[in-house]
Image (tube, coloured by chain):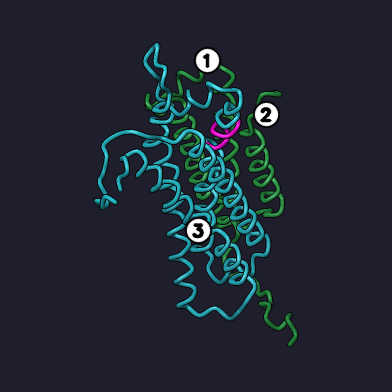
Amino acid sequence: MNASKNLAAPNPPAMTNGSGAAAILSAGIGSFALAVLAFAADKSAPIKSNLVFYKPTGPLSGVTTAAILIWLFTWGILEWRWRKRTVAIGRINAVALALLGLGLLLTFPPIAELL
Amino acid sequence: MEITIRSLWTAIHGMGFGALYLLACSGALIELYRFTTSCEFTSGQERFLKLYLITMVLLAWAAVLTGAYIIYPWYRAAPPPGTADLSMFPQRLLMSSPTTIGWHSLGMEWKEYVAWFAPISITMVVFVFIKYGRDLKNHRQLRAAVLCFTLASFVAAGIAGFFGAMISKYAPVQGGHTIQLSQGEEK
């Protein structure tokens, strides 16, 4: 059997890619925002104390809540702007994945300590 | 046989939500790949995959929320001055010895933030999957991003799960009300 027969033949997309791109980029931005906020809370005592939204959990509560708000706000704005458009998805993917990768690195304590 | 309420919550968080999420990740990666490259999916299978992915979103959010707002406060609780027995204060117990401090300074410090990448990523993946459905086959780059973020979510959950299990081994969260599960017979 030829395996290629099982692969879907690409058709012209029925929907624009804007909505998907908005979700992808905002997830990258949200992840990076989380890492930046965690880094800032680690390096600055005033930022750390301002990010204590729930005392038993400490600054983790503020870092994650603020990052989720940034993620959802960005997603809402991008969805509103892009939902009916076809956008340069290759570049957007690259930026989103770079932000995700940088976020992962920045949360790694030995790297955060080097900065 | 008995268990404390804190141990029970730790088990629900790690072995319930977290481990189930990790198990589901490999299935999601394979099924998302198959769905977006194959024509063989029926509408029933598509509905099942949607339900599977939505369950993953719920598991991921349940894992991070129970971790951050129920278990983490017990983990980071500060002991009263002069406390010699640190077994009820896991963070301080780990920090009290050079052989275990790394489980806090590297393990918990990384885990507490990196875990949140999993629900953010998988929520996006499910949104794109539900929004585009079969049309995702025709968006090669959206499909690639969806698979990359699913993989990233798997990695993030794996890091959090690994350190969670190791920290529980060296400094388990203990205490609270005890629940009697069964009465053993004396031998």
Q: Which mark is residue A45?
A: 1
Asked if residue B125 is positioned above or below residue B107 in the image, the reply reads: below
Q: Residue at x 30, y 45 (%)?
A: B2
Task: Find numbered disc 2 in the image and state the secondary structure of the residue it sits on.
Answer: helix
* Type of amino acid under label 2: Pro
Q: State which chain disc 1 sits on.
A: A
Query: Which residue is at the front of the view, A79 or A43?
Result: A43
Judging by the rendered image, the residue that carries numbered circle 3 is B126
Quadrant in the picture for residue B84: top left
Percent position of residue B144, x then y? 66, 59
What residue range appears in magenta?
B106-111
Q: State which chain disc 3 sits on.
A: B
Query: Which residue is at the front of the view, B77 or A100?
Result: B77
Instruction: Count neighbours of disc 1 (C-alpha within 10 A) and say few if under 14, some if 14 to 19, many if 20 or more.
Output: few
Percent position of residue B121, x then y? 55, 50
* Type of amino acid under label 1: Ala
Instruction: Please give the letter of the chain rendered in green.
Output: A
Q: Residue at x 57, y 32 (%)?
A: B103
Percent position of residue B114, x then y? 56, 39
Q: CA distance from mark 2 to mark 3?
A: 32 Å
Q: Colour in which chain B is shown? A: cyan
Q: CA distance from mark 1 to mark 3?
A: 37 Å
Residue B110 in magenta stretch: yes
Judging by the rendered image, the residue that carries numbered circle 2 is A110
Percent position of residue B5, x then y? 31, 40
Asked if residue B31 is positioned above or below residue A110 in the image, the reply reads: below
Q: Nearer the viewer, mark 2 or mark 3?
A: 2
Q: State which chain disc 2 sits on.
A: A
